[in-house]
Amino acid sequence: MSDDKHDRERKLMDLLLRIKKAPFYKRKLADYNLMNIGLEKISKLPFTVNAELRKAEAFDHLAVEHKEAIHYCESVDTTEKKTSTWLTQKDLETGIRQIKGCGLDKEDIVLFRFPEEFTTTSFHMEQACLEVGATIIPAHRMVMSYPKLLSLMDRLSVTVIVGSPREIERMTETIRLLGLDKGEHFPSLRAIIVTGEVMSDRRKEHLERKWDVPLFNIYSTNETGNIAAMCEHGAMHIFEQDVVVEAWKEDGSGPVDQGDRGLAVITTLSSQASPLLRYLNEDVISFEQGLCPCGKTEKKLVCYGQLQQRTRFKGIVLDEKDIQDAIYSLDPVPAAWKVIQQKNGLHIMLDSEQYDERSLEEIEGKLSKMLKVAVTVEIGYGTLLNRNELLQDIVPKRQEYIGNEGSEDPNVSSSILLRDLLDRGYSAFRINEYEKAHRLFEEAISLVPHSAEAHAWLAAVYGRQIDTAWSLTDKIDLFNKLENEITVALEIDPTLPLARRMNGSKLLNTPDMLGGDPAEAAKEFRYCIEQGMNDIEIWVSLAKCYMETADLAKAREALKEALAIEPKNEEALQLLQDAMNK
């Protein structure tokens, strides 16, 4: 085993030892044996999804004593739900080491321009500057117009800009509005470092042409910290000594092949305060192994954007990176843009004063050819970017790049985690571990309250617990819970076979005076069989319905089907004998 792999294995072992100190993971990993889990077996451990992190309290993520944490960050989504990240001194040192590799030095004067400063990466960058002795201008903390910001850069001879790509583009447009010359007004500028958004090849080239300096991208999230950084050859190298990166199929069924697109799954090996295990962040990525001209051997990662920004048309799948590469190939490149997915293609809004209506057909043709879908284009000036706001002390609104007309994007990470919880609950149910199954199905309902399958499985657990309950009071209480879960499941999806099966079991096993109805139960079981259920239990249940309604011929037919599946089943044999004797 190479020294690098041995070190990563050791870090994973250390992570699994300490991660249960966080209340969140103590609960989540209660049923897992973490012994002998190495890098090759990490996929046996559960995913962590954003919905879980948002639901947990801030201190649930903390895996160290609170006095060891030196910094706290939050990220907020569009629903104002927060995810929390804590940092220890060691976490800070890890982040500084990663950022220092981006080439900052003590001669630099660094302008920070993020829409939000309350992020892990911006904090790491500031601390890295302090570590190397660079000068910091924290302009993201100041409400100022872009002309004032550019004046500040000119007067203070800024050498590096650090910020989001959209902030760099707003500064670019302001330079155009003011008629400034980059060489004359910003001669000291030598590099731009961006993070927080997709940076396609064409977008990178566009900004490098406008500023005449190299641009470097850092792939990070507030929850994980830094994941990868771009070298001078434009390759994004993963920080393999600090993170494990997997790429999984969209349905969660397994990893994708090397080079193919999949969902990013991040394990933070080096994180002390807020470690994450197999965090499914819903970014679409790919990665490849191979020696880079820069000399690095770490995997090279490409980020294509978030899965909820993906568009699909009859086998054509487009991620934000694909759309960016098309739009930033236009000449001129628009100052702002927005894409709306429609039923028959994409509607793209372009904000630029350098287009006219005569170019509309040409632009539509070029974009349609590049994206391989029908594209309509709307050209305007000031429709997406308010130039007056650029010139005033107004905090600009967050840019939305891709919208989906008339529908909401599915929460894929929650769907994958739901499937995992249901599968684990079913495994526990099969071996009669009903308490464990109960907890897992309740967790599934908490994650996705509208899951009919989760409610139906919880009803199944209540059904088994009724059989083992001793007191009449307990049986009545469990029956009421079973009935409620069946009702909810059928309200959500009246066609779900499992819910119909549970309803059939309730109708069969409930006394007539309490609403039992074997004839209706038989209809439910027949429906389930027509939908593909074919196990011995459902045929025996159907036979019992027919025996209750004195339809012995059909009862015998059902029992023969049951015995075809399991010829020596004692219950089916006894029922068949009873049916033959009547």
Image (spheres, helix red, strand yellow):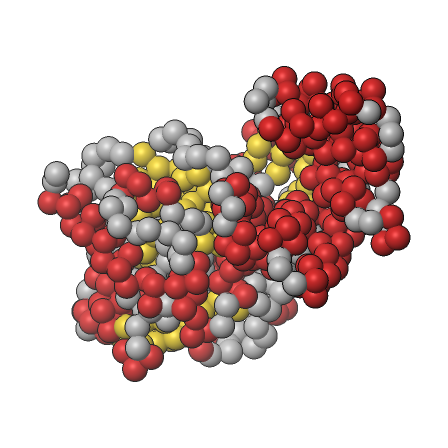
Residue 530 visible? The answer is no
Q: Quadrant of the N terminus?
A: top left
As drawn, is 426 to the left or to the right of 156?
Answer: right
As drawn, is 134 to the left or to the right of 114?
Answer: left
Residue 514 visible? The answer is yes
Q: Is residue 260 above or below residue 320?
A: above
Residue 455 percent coordinates (x, y):
67, 51
As drawn, is 209 to the left or to the right of 347?
Answer: left
How many badges with numbers are in the image? 0
Given residues 248 and 341, the one toward you in this image is 248
Given residues 524 and 58, the one toward you in this image is 524
- Residue at 21% x, 61% y: name it: 97
Residue 401 percent coordinates (x, y):
60, 51
- Residue at 26% x, 50% y: name it: 35
Residue pushed farthest bottom?
67
Residue 419 percent coordinates (x, y):
55, 44
- Residue at 44% x, 38% y: name it: 248
- Residue at 39% x, 29% y: name it: 257
Q: Is residue 579 above or below residue 482?
A: above
Quadrant assignment, res 534: top right
Residue pushed farthest front?
581
Quadrant assignment, res 370: top right
